[in-house]
Image: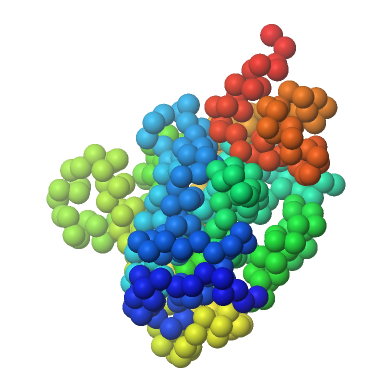
């Protein structure tokens, strides 16, 4: 797929000259589905980023659960603050590797747009309910949002992002999965086909790893603040224990006499620094051995050769953190109860709206002709914030 309808501006040519040969250049943007759009003072990926930030779906992330629903307190991460943290890490890593930081930032900000209310429980519930109707997956949903359901321009639906951004938003190869979600739409099929040609760009892979680095470390902090995770138990995690030792050497007595909550922040910052530094170092070393000189060469490498990775030791340490979080936080009885409640609300809303679509707003009902009842209900519910879904549920609940 090659499109040349967006001529490059001087700013884009200038920006490209600083990038590594395997980075995504502005000349790799593949154009936009709805014609060329040029602006002298922003590059094409900066425009994509700005469109995402100005979208309704992005604002709603502020009221969607990361782990804790936002009625639990104001200091916990939401999908919005998580996305900002991922974009900060992604920009830093991309800059250190001479990758396109604007493109990486755009993908990081967009990576959770398709998430349902109530975290992963919401996605699992909706996927189950959409069985036989194409299923539901948050990554495909992100693409649906930016290509169809966001409504900001009179000439076309969606945000008209560059094809390169749309391809980068697909974390995994699409296979046949997305075809159920997008049923017969040529533009979606083109994006999925292009994504399935090979590896993601390095910027997309960096955003994906930074997502994992961000939530692994921040969930430890939020878990501690909730009272479900305890400092002494976290010392059992090798990465945490070692980072505590390094911090103790660095700060000496001051750390010993600090509050546990401050100690935790110091240790987590140390762990996060180790993961990010290792990601940059290992990726640079792998690139040195590979000697690749273009994006095309990068995309056609075998997955085992793909250079964006952490070293084996830090990868194992990250796995230990994930296992600890799964066992002690995500499977904590109170977190399971929050998830069950979310599942119950989504199941109820889905059944009610499918049986009586006239309860949805008129502009949503209009989409039924094109997308079908179940897909329209799935789009509507997945776009809801936690609190809006709760409100709708209470309106329908018999008192
Ligand atoms: Mg995420």
Q: Nearer the viewer, residue 94 or 211?
A: 94
With 109 as the anchor, is 346 left or right in this view? right
Q: Which residue reaches farthest top? A: 399
Q: Which residue reaches farthest right? A: 132
Q: Which residue reaches farthest left? A: 253
User: Which residue occupies 39% across, 81% down?
Assistant: 20
Q: Position of residue 311 (x, y in %)?
A: 44, 74
Q: Nearer the viewer, residue 1 or 314?
A: 1
Q: Position of residue 93 (x, y in %)?
A: 37, 67
Q: In this rendering, is residue 127 above or below 46?
A: above
Q: In this rendering, is residue 64 above or below 305?
A: above
Q: Position of residue 26 (x, y in %)?
A: 46, 72
With 271 as the anchor, is 341 left or right in this view? right
The C terminus is located in which quarter? top right
Q: Nearer the viewer, residue 130 or 342?
A: 130
Q: Quadrant of residue 149?
A: top right
The reply to whether residue 235 is in sight is yes
With 61 as the anchor, is 359 left or right in this view? right
The N terminus is located in which quarter? bottom right
User: Which residue occupies 55% across, 27% down?
Assistant: 387
User: Which residue occupies 15% across, 48% down?
Assistant: 254
User: Which residue occupies 36% across, 56% down?
Assistant: 88
Q: Nearer the viewer, residue 244 or 220?
A: 220
> So how many labels did they put on this image?
0
Q: Position of residue 116 (x, y in %)?
A: 61, 40
Q: In this rendering, is residue 214 above or below 19?
A: above
């Amino acid at each position: 797929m090659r499109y040349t309808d967006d001529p490059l501006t001087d700013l884009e040519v200038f920006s490209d000259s600083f990038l590594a040969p395997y980075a995504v250049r502005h000349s790799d943007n593949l154009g936009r589905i709805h014609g060329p759009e040029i602006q002298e003072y922003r590059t094409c990926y900066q425009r994509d980023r700005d469109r995402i930030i100005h979208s309704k779906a992005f604002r709603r992330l502020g009221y969607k659960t990361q782990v804790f629903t936002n009625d639990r307190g104001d200091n916990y991460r939401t999908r919005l603050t998580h996305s900002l943290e991922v974009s900060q890490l992604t920009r830093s890593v991309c800059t250190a590797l001479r990758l396109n930081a604007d493109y990486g930032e755009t993908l990081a900000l967009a990576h959770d747009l398709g998430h349902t209310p109530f975290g992963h429980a919401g996605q699992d519930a909706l996927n189950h309910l959409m069985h036989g109707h194409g299923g539901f997956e948050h990554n495909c949903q992100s693409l649906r949002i930016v290509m169809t359901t966001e409504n900001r321009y009179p000439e076309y639906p969606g945000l008209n992002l560059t094809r390169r951004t749309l391809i980068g938003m697909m974390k995994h190869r699409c296979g046949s999965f997305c075809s159920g979600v997008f049923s017969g739409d040529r533009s979606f099929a083109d994006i999925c086909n292009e994504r399935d040609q090979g590896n993601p760009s390095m910027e997309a892979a960096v955003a994906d790893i930074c997502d994992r680095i961000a939530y692994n470390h921040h969930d430890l902090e939020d878990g501690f603040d909730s009272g479900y995770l305890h400092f002494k138990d976290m010392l059992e995690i090798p990465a945490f224990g070692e980072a505590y030792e390094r911090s103790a050497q660095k700060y000496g007595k001051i750390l010993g006499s600090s509050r546990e909550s401050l100690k935790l922040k110091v240790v987590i910052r140390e762990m996060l620094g180790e993961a990010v530094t290792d990601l940059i170092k290992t990726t640079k070393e792998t690139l040195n051995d590979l000697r690749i000189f273009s994006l095309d060469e990068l995309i056609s490498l075998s997955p085992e050769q793909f250079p964006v990775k952490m070293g084996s030791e830090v990868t194992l340490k990250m796995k230990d953190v994930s296992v600890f979080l799964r066992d002690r936080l995500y499977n904590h009885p109170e977190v399971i109860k929050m998830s069950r409640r979310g599942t119950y609300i989504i199941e109820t809303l889905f059944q009610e709206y499918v049986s009586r679509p006239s309860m949805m707003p008129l502009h949503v009902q209009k989409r039924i002709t094109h997308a079908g009842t179940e897909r329209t209900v799935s789009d509507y519910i997945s776009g809801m914030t936690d609190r809006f879904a709760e409100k709708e549920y209470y309106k329908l609940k018999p008192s």
